[in-house]
Amino acid sequence: MKLSTGIIISLVLALLGTNALWLYAAIDAGVTATYRETTHRQNKEALDQALAIFPVINNITYTKEEVIKAAKHPYYKSELFEKDGYLWVGNIGLSFSETGRLYEVKRAWE
C-alpha cells in the first residue's frame, strides 16, 4: 500500500511538472510571436516611409519640408523630435545637410 501511494504521488508531481513546462513553452511562444509581429510591423512602416521619400528626393529641387511631409504620410502620429543629429519621424531618423539636402536615413532600432 505504501509503495503504490509513493508511485501515485511521484506520478502526480511528474504530471504537474510537465504541465508547468508546457505552460511555460506556450507563454514563451506567445511572447515570441508578439515580438515578431511588432518587429514586422515596424519594418513595414519604415520601408513604406522610405519608399514615400524616394519620389520626393528624385526631384532635384526638393525641400526639407517636402521630405518630412512624405515621411509623415502613411504612419506618423506623434510629434517630430530631434536626437543625435537626426529628425525622427516615426520609425526613421532623417539627417539633413546644412543646405537642407537629405544626407542619411536611419532606422529607430539600429
Image (tube, rainbow, N blue to C red):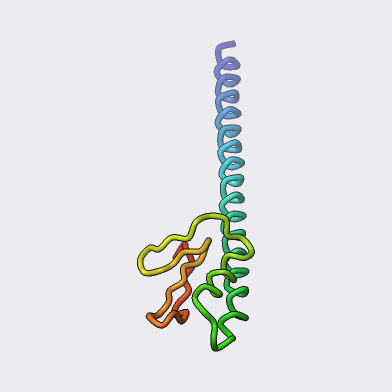
- Horizontal and vertical percent position of residue 19: 60, 32
Q: In which quarter of the image is the N terminus?
A: top right
Q: Answer left or right for 80 relative to 1.
A: left
Determine the residue positioned at 58% across, 86% down. 59
Q: Which residue lies furthest to the left in this view?
A: 84
Q: In which quarter of the image is the C terminus?
A: bottom left
Q: Residue furthest top?
A: 1
Q: Which of 44 and 22 is in front in this view?
A: 44
Q: Answer left or right for 100 relative to 4.
A: left
Q: Nearer the viewer, residue 9 or 50?
A: 50
Position above or below: 89 against 29: below
Quadrant hosting residue 62: bottom right
- Horizontal and vertical percent position of residue 74: 64, 64
Q: Nearer the viewer, residue 67 or 21?
A: 67
Q: Nearer the viewer, residue 11 or 72?
A: 72
Position above or below: 78 against 99: above
Determine the residue positioned at 48% across, 60% down. 80
Determine the residue positioned at 62% across, 69% down. 48
- Horizontal and vertical percent position of residue 46: 57, 66
Quadrant hosting residue 60: bottom right
